[in-house]
Image (cartoon, rainbow, N blue to C red):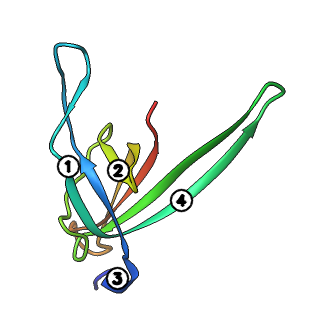
Amino acid sequence: MKALKVDKKWLTDEFYYFEFIGETDDYGSEIYEEPKLIKHCRIEYVSEINRSSLKVDNDTHAIIFCYEKVTAPFKYFRTRSKISILNQEYEIKKVLPYKEPYSNELWSIELEIGQIS
């Protein structure tokens, strides 16, 4: 038995992925690979407002859904990598892989992204 089939027509979003290499340059800046365009995914935006007596913070982040049979190119994403959506940069905070229910095959990956700190 296979997991739910995802129709490509549902996945209308795309983003640029800058994979974190895990090294820094001579100036201490993190090094990333050249950007790759990832197509056929779903991006759901979340906005949180945090209030204190001194200020109001608006924290915008998103969850990206990528599916093995549809998203192109489908890969295992790395935390600390950067994502660019409509010229706004975010950082991957969490990578959540999901497998097929009756096998060990990867079915989808959920990315939790947030503003670069």
How far apart marks 1 and 4 lie (CA) works out to: 22 Å
N-term-proximal mark, 4 vs 3: 3
Front of the two marks 2 and 4: 2
Can residue 93 be seen?
A: no
Q: Which residue occupies 15% across, 44% down?
A: 34
**Considering the numbered disc 3 on the image, is that residue within a helix, a strand or a loop?**
loop
Quadrant housing residue 3: bottom left
Q: Mark 3 highlights which residue?
A: 6
**Mark 1 against mark 4, which lies toward the viewer?**
1
Callout 1, which amino acid? Answer: Pro
Q: Residue 65 versus residue 103: which sits nearer the camera?
A: 65
- Do tag 1 and tag 2 residues touch (Cβ < 8 Å)? yes
Q: Amino acid at mark 4?
A: Tyr
Observer-nearest of 69 and 43: 43
Q: Residues within 10 Å of mark 2 (few under 14, many from 20)?
A: some
Q: Earlier in the sequence, mark 2 or mark 4?
A: 4
Marking on residue 84: 2
Q: CA distance from mark 1 to mark 2?
A: 9 Å
Q: Which residue is mark 1?
A: 35
- Amino acid type, mark 3: Val
Residue contact between numbered discs 1 and 3, judged by CB atoms under 8 Å: no
The residue depicted at 22 percent of the width and 13 percent of the height is 27
